[in-house]
Image: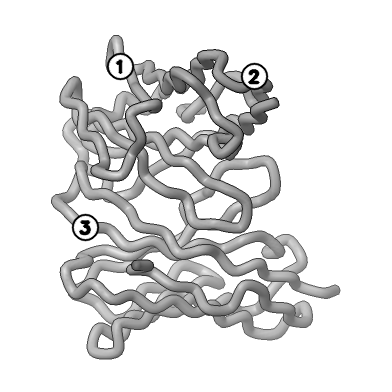
Amino acid sequence: DAMVIQNPRYQVTQFGKPVTLSCSQTLNHNVMYWYQQKSSQAPKLLFHYYDKDFNNEADTPDNFQSRRPNTSFCFLDIRSPGLGDAAMYLCATSGEAGGLTTDTQYFGPGTRLTVL
Amino acid sequence: DQQVKQNSPSLSVQEGRISILNCDYTNSMFDYFLWYKKYPAEGPTFLISISSIKDKNEDGRFTVFLNKSAKHLSLHIVPSQPGDSAVYFCAARYGSSNTGKLIFGQGTTLQVKP
């Protein structure tokens, strides 16, 4: 089945140690998003790619970076994780695929990041 | 400043009855609204949506109502089933289709009791 896949599902890192979260999609969507969700809060958009164009949210800390090497993959890099970065990180996709437009974002299962 | 609010953190209903989840928003530029359902340890799953040009959209047991003048939308689940127990997020889109960004509410935890 076409889907959004996130690896790993659970990630533990140490304070200040760089970490990379991975997202891949088989939907062939041209837009990919990264959200941060802390406990009992709304998912918060960090940034998104429209094709190869990177769009950062104004309040996303510089500590968070992203790469999209091709349509299928997108990475979230946290350069120096702090305790406050412990959260669920959600990847989502939307956009045109096969000439059809979708207004809906489709989410992966998320990666739970723990910072020790 | 929270532009999308779900003021009820939790809701409990009996199986077979109606569940009504509410959502309020402040930005009149939102053009599309979505409801997502989230089980523990899973990502949000799209449930139903409504365009700002409509006031109702129905899909099986799920109906979303939009009241633009009140900047309010609601999700009705009839009849409620135990498998509907989950966290429900409303989301509002701004920007163009395809690249529109979503703003989420904080979620409402629905518990459907057998």
Are the numbered discs 1 and 2 placed on the same chain, yes or no?
yes
Residue A48 image offset from top left, x and y in percent: 28, 34
Mark 3 = which residue? B94
Quarter-of-image position of residue B30: bottom left
Disc 1 from disc 2: Cα separation:
22 Å
Residue furthest toward the top?
A69
- At x 73%, y 78%, the residue is B12
Disc 2 from disc 3: Cα separation:
34 Å
The disc, 1 or 2, on the residue closer to the chain's N-terminal end is 2
- Which chain does the residue under circle 2 lie in? A
Element assignment for label 3 = strand
Element assignment for label 2 = strand
Disc 3 from disc 1: Cα separation:
23 Å
Element assignment for label 1 = loop
Crowd rating for badge 1 (residues with CA inside 10 Å; few <14, some 14–19, many 20+): some
Mark 1 = which residue? A68
Residue A34 visible, this orientation: yes
Are the numbered discs 2 and 3 placed on the same chain, yes or no?
no
- The quarter of the picture where the C terminus of chain A appears is top right
- Which chain does the residue under circle 3 lie in? B
- At x 66%, y 30%, the residue is A114
Q: Amino acid at mark 1?
A: Arg
Mark 2 = which residue? A13
Q: Amino acid at mark 3?
A: Tyr
Q: Which mark is residue A51?
A: none
- Which chain does the residue under circle 1 lie in? A
Q: Nearer the viewer, mark 1 or mark 2?
A: 2
Asked whether the beta carbons under mark 2 and mark 3 sit within 8 Å of each other, the answer is: no
Quarter-of-image position of residue B18: bottom right
